[in-house]
Image (spheres, rainbow, N blue to C red):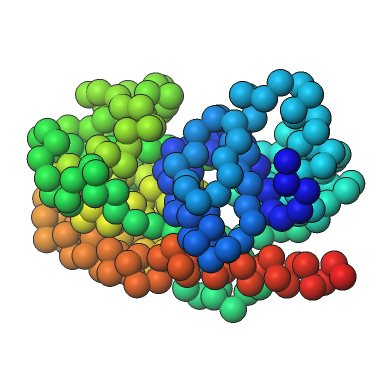
């Protein structure tokens, strides 16, 4: 069992696309020689070149030894487990990806887009296309729109719901665990298939609200040339660019389905893909994490 180095604990609340992004970052950290152990509460993590441990796959003794001895610094991604005080009492701790209503557990590290590049307490997500799912625009069924409601949102954006009610010019599907979120959907897909679904031809992503997780899904959508429709969001402005998605604002007319699936949507997707490919690489993400860890460790000495 490793006694030193960084440990990532990934809570079960993280969506598969969140874990994909973190997997790209972890792989790059491993390439650069960072000693990293990843403990996944869900048991799934797509990373490589790092040690991966399934929390639910450990017995009580193994878990106890992990909490008492593994790692001298821990990074919590998502909701804090009830045993987190044990870790924070003996190790340096960092917290990212928390729900809005949750308190910071340890040092707060927040999403960093292009505008927050110099912030030492920020991290930048990583994106890559998974070519095993095909090239952007490959045929995986007919044109469709995917609606994803952020888990942390209590009330959807009214203008986005109005867009859906008027019709986006495509059949609409939603996530299977958001059964009551939008009654007009014609089908449902599992969240583990969301990015694969968006890699198909003629897709559209509709977000009735934006949190960090849904913004990361929009980043993957951009890499496959899929336009995102969402209420105006500072997170999406920083991630995709103000011209990289179709922002629904109170002072502008609601776009038609033809606009969303036509040239306006395609132009937005191209701008977003360029921005993501340039600024949110695994190398840039790993650098943001490394700089934050160095600053925190130097401050702890």
The image shows residue 38 at horizontal and vertical percentages of 60, 44
Q: Residue furthest bottom?
A: 118
Say if 43 sits above or below 281 in the image: above
Between 153 and 213, the one lying in front of the other is 213
99 or 161: nearer the viewer: 99
Which quarter of the figure is the N terminus placed in? top right
Q: Quadrant of residue 58?
A: top right
Q: Up-down: is 45 above or below 283? A: above
Q: Position of residue 16 (x, y in %)?
A: 44, 38
237 above or below 195? Answer: below
Q: Does residue 227 appear left or right of residue 141 in this picture?
A: right
Is residue 93 among what the camera can see? no
- Which residue occupies 76% across, 21% down? 60
Taking depth in this image into account, of 51 and 271 the one nearest to the observer is 51
| Location of residue 252 (image quadrant) | bottom left
Q: Position of residue 238 (x, y in %)?
A: 45, 67
Q: Which quadrant holds the C terminus?
A: bottom right
User: Which residue is located at x 31 percent, y 27 percent?
Assistant: 189
Residue 72 appears anywhere in the view:
yes
Look at 28% across and 45% down and name the residue there. Answer: 205
Q: Indicate left or right for 37 with 202 as reference.
A: right
Q: As drawn, is 184 to the left or to the right of 113? A: left
All told, the count of numbered labels is 0
| Residue furthest out toward the front | 1
Q: Residue at x 76, y 58 (%)?
A: 107
- Relative image position of residue 96 (x, y in whole percent): 64, 52
Whether residue 156 sits left or right of residue 75 in the image: it is left
């Amino acid at each position: 069992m490793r006694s030193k180095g960084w440990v990532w604990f990934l809570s079960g609340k993280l969506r598969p696309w969140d874990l994909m992004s973190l997997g790209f970052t972890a792989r790059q950290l491993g390439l650069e020689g960072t000693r990293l152990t990843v403990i996944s509460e869900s048991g799934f993590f797509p990373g490589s070149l790092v040690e991966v441990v399934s929390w639910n796959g450990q017995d009580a003794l193994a878990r106890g030894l992990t909490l008492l001895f593994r790692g001298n610094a821990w990074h919590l991604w998502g909701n804090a487990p009830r045993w987190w005080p044990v870790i924070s009492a003996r190790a340096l701790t960092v917290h990212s990806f928390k729900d809005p209503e949750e308190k910071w557990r340890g040092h707060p590290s927040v999403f960093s887009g292009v505008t927050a590049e110099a912030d030492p307490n920020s991290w930048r997500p990583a994106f890559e296309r998974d070519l095993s799912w095909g090239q952007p625009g490959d045929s995986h069924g007919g044109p469709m729109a995917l609606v994803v409601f952020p888990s942390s949102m209590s009330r959807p954006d009214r203008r986005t719901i109005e867009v859906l009610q008027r019709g986006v010019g495509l059949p609409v599907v939603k996530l299977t665990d958001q059964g009551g979120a939008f009654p007009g959907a014609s089908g449902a897909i599992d969240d583990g298939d969301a990015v694969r679904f968006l890699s198909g031809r003629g897709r559209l992503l509709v977000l009735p609200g934006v949190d960090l997780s849904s913004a990361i899904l929009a980043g993957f959508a951009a890499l496959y040339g899929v336009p995102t429709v969402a209420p105006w969001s500072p997170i999406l402005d920083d991630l995709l660019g103000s011209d990289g998605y179709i922002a629904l604002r109170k002072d502008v007319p609601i776009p038609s389905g033809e606009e969303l699936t036509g040239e306006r949507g395609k132009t937005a997707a191209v701008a977003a893909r360029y921005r993501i490919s340039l600024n949110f690489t695994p190398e840039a993400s790993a650098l943001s994490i490394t700089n934050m860890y160095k600053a925190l460790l130097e401050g702890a000495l």
